């Protein structure tokens, strides 16, 4: 008798660095198989795994490059100023070293992919009851188009793979993506990334949104006042891209733990500044003080870092702290440029 697929898998996992996690996933599937016998449940499980597999295959060779996601309405016409602004912000994002992700459809998404060009575009489409056609620019992208069966897996990869978000005027879908992103950022479920609300000059779409939603929530005490700093507003493409680049001037990335965070940096902060930082941002700390150290990023490189046990209810305050770090005049500060490539060390990184 031939070997079973599980036996063959066991052989292939010999020496795999993530063998324990893989075995745990297989055990979870077997546990579900004991209790779930309906076809609908297994369609969901199978479809979810297929979404994950296909998306990981697309992103694996692009993992090193930083990416900006542009959200916006599929109904925006080419003559609308938002379409041209989407094209401009994507064009400038690519010039700054980013790749550009969209939902692959028309309107703002098409404008952004046209500005980025097929070589720098990634499209995350989704199956809908009415067909959403992928725009020509992501269709021509070499291996950069993914079709998701489910919105929830698509949202997962938007946030998982994005280093910045640009949200332009849109309807329910765009606002859903905005609130989903804000929820994951505010609750600390995703590392800090810049989120820019972009609309043409003279268009009060986001001013009205902030007044009617954001400010009202803060006034009622439903969000912290500093949560308003989780988003930036811009009316020009160069301002939007500049804000994103500034976010990564000193700050490189973050490693999240249950009750701590380590901010990996492109240049070391002198230890002499730590007492002042700990005092100035004492309300951010759950306990202790801000400590300096070093750690390895997800790219395997060693970076200087700041370690702190922070109050996860104060993520808006964490963004203020990152902004303060990015404004510091550090040694070799003139050499600090936006690290477009996640694997390139800049400034003071060892």
Image (cartoon, grey):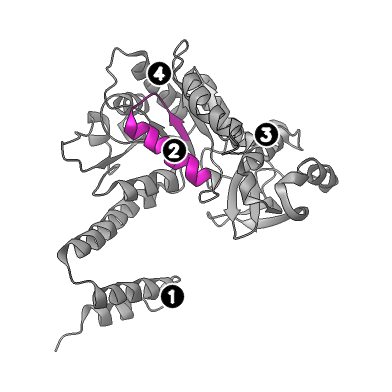
Q: Position of residue 59 (x, y in %)?
A: 37, 49
Q: Position of residue 104 (x, y in %)?
A: 28, 35
Residue bearing mark 2: 179
The mark nearer the N terminus, 2 or 1, is 1
In depth, the one of 106 and 280 nearer the eye is 280
The mark nearer the N terminus, 4 or 2, is 4
Distance, label 2 to label 1, CA atoms, is 35 Å
| Identity of the residue drawn at 77% across and 38% down | 331
Distance, label 3 to label 1, CA atoms, is 42 Å
In depth, the one of 201 and 23 nearer the eye is 201
Distance, label 4 to label 2, CA atoms, is 22 Å
The mark nearer the N terminus, 2 or 3, is 2
Given the current orientation, which residue lies at the most extreme bottom position?
1
Question: Is disc 4 in contact with disc 2, using a CB cutoff of under 8 Å?
Answer: no
Distance, label 2 to label 3, CA atoms, is 36 Å
| Identity of the residue drawn at 79% across and 46% down | 278
Residue bearing mark 1: 20
């Amino acid at each position: 008798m031939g070997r079973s697929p599980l036996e063959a898998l066991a052989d292939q996992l010999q020496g795999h660095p993530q063998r324990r996690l893989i075995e745990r996933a297989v055990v979870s599937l077997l546990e579900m198989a004991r209790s779930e016998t309906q076809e609908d449940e297994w369609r969901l499980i199978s479809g979810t795994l297929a979404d994950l597999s296909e998306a990981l295959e697309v992103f694996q060779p692009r993992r090193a490059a930083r990416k900006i996601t542009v959200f916006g309405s599929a109904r925006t016409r080419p003559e609308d100023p938002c379409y041209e602004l989407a094209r401009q912000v994507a064009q400038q994002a690519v010039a700054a070293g980013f790749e550009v992700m969209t939902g692959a459809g028309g309107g703002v998404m098409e404008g952004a992919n046209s500005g980025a060009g097929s070589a720098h575009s990634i499209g995350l489409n989704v199956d809908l009851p009415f067909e959403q056609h992928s725009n020509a620019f992501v269709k021509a992208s070499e291996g950069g188009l993914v079709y998701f069966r489910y919105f929830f897996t698509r949202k997962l990869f938007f946030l998982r793979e994005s280093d910045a978000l640009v949200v332009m005027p849109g309807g329910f879908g765009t606002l859903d993506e905005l609130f989903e992103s804000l929820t994951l950022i505010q609750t600390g479920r995703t590392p800090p990334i810049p989120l820019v609300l972009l609309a043409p000059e003279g268009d009060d779409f986001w001013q009205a949104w902030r007044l009617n939603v954001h400010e009202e929530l803060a006034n009622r005490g439903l969000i912290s006042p500093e949560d308003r700093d989780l988003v930036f507003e811009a009316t020009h493409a160069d301002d939007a891209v500049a804000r994103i680049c500034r976010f990564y001037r000193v700050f490189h990335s973050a490693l999240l733990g249950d009750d701590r965070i380590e901010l990996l940096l492109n240049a070391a902060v002198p230890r002499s500044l730590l007492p002042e930082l700990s005092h100035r941002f004492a309300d951010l700390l759950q306990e202790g003080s801000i400590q300096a150290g070093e750690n390895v990023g997800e790219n395997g490189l060693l970076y200087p870092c700041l370690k702190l046990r922070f109050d996860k209810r104060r993520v808006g305050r964490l963004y203020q702290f990152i902004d303060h770090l990015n404004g510091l005049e550090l040694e070799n500060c003139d050499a600090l440029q936006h690290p477009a490539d996640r694997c390139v060390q800049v400034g003071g990184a060892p």
